[in-house]
Amino acid sequence: MIPFLAKRIGLLIPTFLGVTVVAFLFIRLLPGDPVLLLAGERGLSPERYAELMAQFGFDRPLWQQYLEYLTGVLHGDLGNSIVTKQPVLSEFAALFPATLELSITAMIFAVVLGLPAGVIAAVRRGSVFDHTVMSTALVGYSMPIFWWGLLLIIVFSGWLGWTPVSGRISLLYYFPTPTGFMLIDSLLSGQKGAFGSAVSHLILPAIVLGTIPLAVIARQTRSAMLEVLGEDYVRTARAKGLAPGRVVGLHALRNALIPVITTIGLQAGLLLAGAILTETIFSWPGVGKWLVDSIFRRDYQVVQGGLLLIAGIVMIVNLAVDVAYGLVNPRIRHRR
Amino acid sequence: MLLRTLASALALTTCLAFTAAEAKTLVYCSEASPEGFNPSFFTGGQTFDASAKPIYNRLVEFERGTTNVVPGLAESWEVSDDGLEYVFKLRQGVKFHASDKFTPSRDFNADDVLFSFNRQLKKDEPWYKVSAPTYEYFDGMSMPDLIKNIEKVDDYTVKFTLTRPEAPMIANLAMDFASIMSAEYADQMMKAGTPEVIDNEPVGTGPFRFVAYQKDAVIRYEAFADYFGGKQAIDQLVFAITPDASVRLQKLKAGECHVMAYPNPADIGGLMNDDTLQVMQQEGLNVGYLAYNTMVAPFDNPKVRKALNMAINKEAIIESVFQGTGSPAKNPIPPTMWSYNEAVTDDPYDPESAKKMLEEAGAAGLKMKVWAMPVARPYNPNARRMAELIQEDFKKIGVEVEIVSFEWGEYLKRSSEKERDGAVLLGWTGDNGDPDNFLAVLLGCDAVGGANRAQWCDKEFNDLIQKAKSLPTQAERTALYEQAQLRFKDQAPWATIAHSLVTIPMSKKVSGYKMDPLGSHRFDGVDIAE
C-alpha cells in the first residue's frame, strides 16, 4: 500500500506544476490587460500606464513573473487581487464554502431523485414511467441553466411566493458565520427561523444546479441496471424464487452502482461549471462568479490563484478516490 | 476559540434579534460588488454608492438631486483673485464613526484633510503605497499636476495652492475620490502594523456607519447617530448585491428589496404599471457618440463628417438600441448640464442631401470601418446593434461599412491611437457636473492621442474651452461653452448619438429619494414607511 500511495502522491507534483503553468498562461494569453481595464474610458497617459504595469510587475519577462508566482505559491502566498487589493486566499476562503454548500445540496438532490428514478425506469422498461423519466431527463440535460433558473424564480418566487428570490438567507438575519456554511451557521446562531430561511434560500439554486446531474444519473442508472438485469446471475436469482425486491435491490443495484458512482464523481467536477451560472442568477456569493468576473477584469492574480486552488481541491479529491479504490480493489493497488 | 466564537455569536444575535424587529431597514438591490471601500482607489459607480456616499463626506458636496456644489466638511471657502489659492474654513464638532478597532478621541479637523489628500499626492510617503492602490481619479483629474501644496493654517483652516487657475476645482473636490478619512484611525492602524485595515473597515463622518460586508452578498450599514447633518430617518441600510437585472426586478416585486438599480429597458413598461411601485426617471449625465478620426482622409474634411451625420437615423437607434430609454443627442454635453446650448440645431436626418454632399466632397463610394464596443455601457447598451443600424444607414448613401471590435481593454487602447482606421463608438459619463469634464477631456487638443477619440484639435474650439476654464463665474463660462458647442456642431468631429435615460424603480413605501444627475445612488434623506 505504501509504494502505491507514494507513487500516487509523486504523480501529484508534476500535475501541480502543470496546473500552475496553465493557470498562469491561460489568463495572459487573452488579449488586453488589467491596467487598461482599470482605467476604462478615462484612459491613461503612456507614462502612467508604464508606471502601473511596473507597479504590478507586468513589465517583466513572463518567465520571471512565473517564477515569482511559483515562489509565492510554494510559500502559500497567492498574491493580492489587482482589483480589490485583497489576498486571493482570503477571498477564496470567504467564498468557497458557499459554492461547496450549494454543490453538495445539488448533488444530494440529484442522487436522491436520479437513482430511484433510473432503477424504476429500468425495472419497468418500456412503461409510461420509463418513457416519462427518460424524456424528462433529456429535457433536463439540455436545459439552459440561466433560463431554467429565471423560470423557477418567476414561478415559485414571483407568482406563488413559495421561495425567496435570491441570496443565502433573509437579510433580517445577521450573525457571524464561522464555518461559512449557512445551514450550519444558522443553526449555531440560535436565531428563530434562521435555519428555515437558509433552507428555503437553498431550494431553487440546488434544483437548478442539480438538474443536469440528475438527468445524467437517472439515465446512467437506467442503462447500468438494464445491463445487469439481463445477466445470468439475476436470472438465476429469479429462478430460485427470490422476491423481486431483493433481486433488484440487493443483487442488481449493487453491481449497477459501480459505473453510476463513477458518473457521480465526474458530475461533481462539472458542478463547478454549472455553479458559475447558478451563482450569478441567485446572487449566490461563491467562487464561480468570482472567477468569471476576474477573467473579465483580467485580474491575473485571482484567476491564476483561484484556478490553482480549485484544481488543487479536485486533485486531492481524486487522490482520495484513487486511494479508496486501491483499498477496496487489490488489483488496482498492485498493478504496475 | 470555537466556544468564544459561539458565545459572541449568541450575544450578537440576541441583541440583533431584538433590534431587527424595531429598526427601520431599507434594502437596496445593487448591481455589483464594490471593488473596495476606499473611494480614492476605484472608479466603479457601485463602489462609490457603497463607500463614498454612505460612509464619507467631502469638503464640499453635490447637493442631493443636483450638480450644485454646497458646503460639506468645509463650511465656507474663498478663492484668491488669481485663482491659485483656495482657503477652506472647516466645520467644527464633526464626529467620526467608531468601529471594533477604533474609537475616535477627537473631532474632524485639518489633519484629516491633509492626510486624505497627501496620501494620494505624495508618492514618497509610506501611505501612498499602502494597499498597493492606483489613484485613478486623482490622477485622471490631473490633481498631481494641479495641486502644488496643501497647508494647515490652523486646526480648522486649510489652504490649497494650485499651479494654475482651474475653475472646476471646487466641483472636483466634491467628487468621491476626495472623501475625507480619519488621520487618527490611520495613525493607530499604522502603529498596530495593519495600515490596510483603514481601507477595508472604513471609518468616515458620513450619514451611515459601515457595519459589515459579506463578499459578493450583503453590505450592512447603520444610521450614524452623531452625524453632523442629523440622524437619518432609517436605522439600517442594507445593500443586497444582485448582479442579474431580471432577478433584481423579481426581488423588488417580492418585497425583498425596496429600491433597485438599473432595470432592463424591456422591463420598464411593466414596472410603470405596477401599483406597488414608483418609477423615477431622469436623463443621465452621459453621451454616446461616433467619433471619426479627423486626422485621416477623407474624415479630415468636415463636409464628409457632416454628410455621414446626416445619414444616421437616431430615432431608429433610440427605439431599437435604447428601447425608448434614451433621447437623441445634438450636443457633446447632456441637457441636464449647465451651459447646454439649446440653440444648436442638430444635423437633420436626410440621406438624400447626405449622399449629394458626399459626392460634392469627392467621397462617393466611401468604404470605412465602424468600431463597436464589446461591452454594454449606460450611454450605449448595445454597440453591436448600434453599429449594424449605422451600417444600414450608411449603405443608403453608398458608404460601405465594415464593423470591427476588440476586447474592451484593447478597444480602449487602439481607439485612442492617432493613426486609427475608422470611426469609433464610445461615450462618456460625467464625473463632476462641469462642462469642462466633457469638452476638454473628450475634445481638447491635450487629449488627442488619448480620450479625444476624434483626434480633433480645433484652435477655435480649444481656445474657447481653455479660456472658459480660467474664468471665475459660471455665467462667464457659460457664454464661452455655448459658443464652443456651436463650433463643435459646425465642425462635426462626432456624430452625437444619444443620452440615456436612467430609471430607478422603488417600492411605494420609499419616500424622499432623489435621483442623482451624476448617476450615484444615495440614501441619505430617504425614509421608508413601516
Image (cartoon, helix red, strand yellow):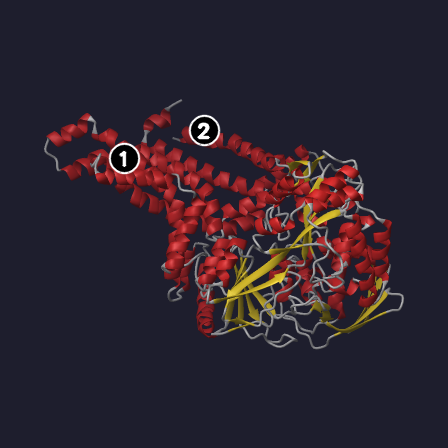
The quadrant holding residue B201 is: bottom right
Left or right relative to B337: residue B22: left
Left or right relative to A46: residue B218: left
Q: Nearer the viewer, residue B314 or B93?
A: B314
Q: Position of residue A263 (x, y in %)?
A: 36, 35
Q: Chain of mark 2?
A: A
Q: Position of residue B161 (x, y in %)?
A: 85, 63
Q: Are marks 1 and 2 in contact (CB under 8 Å)?
A: no
Q: Position of residue B123 (x, y in %)?
A: 78, 53
- The quarter of the image holding the C terminus of chain A is top left
Q: Residue furthest left?
A: A241
Q: Which residue is mark 2?
A: A7
CA separation, marks 1 and 2? 36 Å
Image height check: is B142 above or below B84?
above
Classed neighbour count for the residue bearing mark 2: other residues with Cα under 10 Å, few (<14), some (14–19), many (≥20):
few
Q: Tell me what residue is drawn at x 41 percent, y 46 percent.
A: A209
Q: Tell me what residue is drawn at x 58 percent, y 56 percent.
A: B325
User: Mark 1 vs mark 2: which is more N-terminal?
Assistant: 2
Q: Amino acid at mark 1?
A: Arg
Q: Position of residue B505 (x, y in %)?
A: 53, 63
Q: Residue furthest right?
A: B82
Q: Nearer the viewer, residue B504 or A197?
A: B504
Q: Tell me what residue is drawn at x 79 percent, y 62 percent.
A: B168
Q: Which residue is mark 1?
A: A222
**Circle 1 or circle 2, nearest the eye:** 1
Left or right relative to B458: residue B232: left
Image height check: is B6 above or below B154?
above
Q: Amino acid at mark 2?
A: Lys
Q: Chain of mark 1?
A: A
- The quarter of the image holding the N terminus of chain A is top left
Image height check: is A274 above or below B146?
above
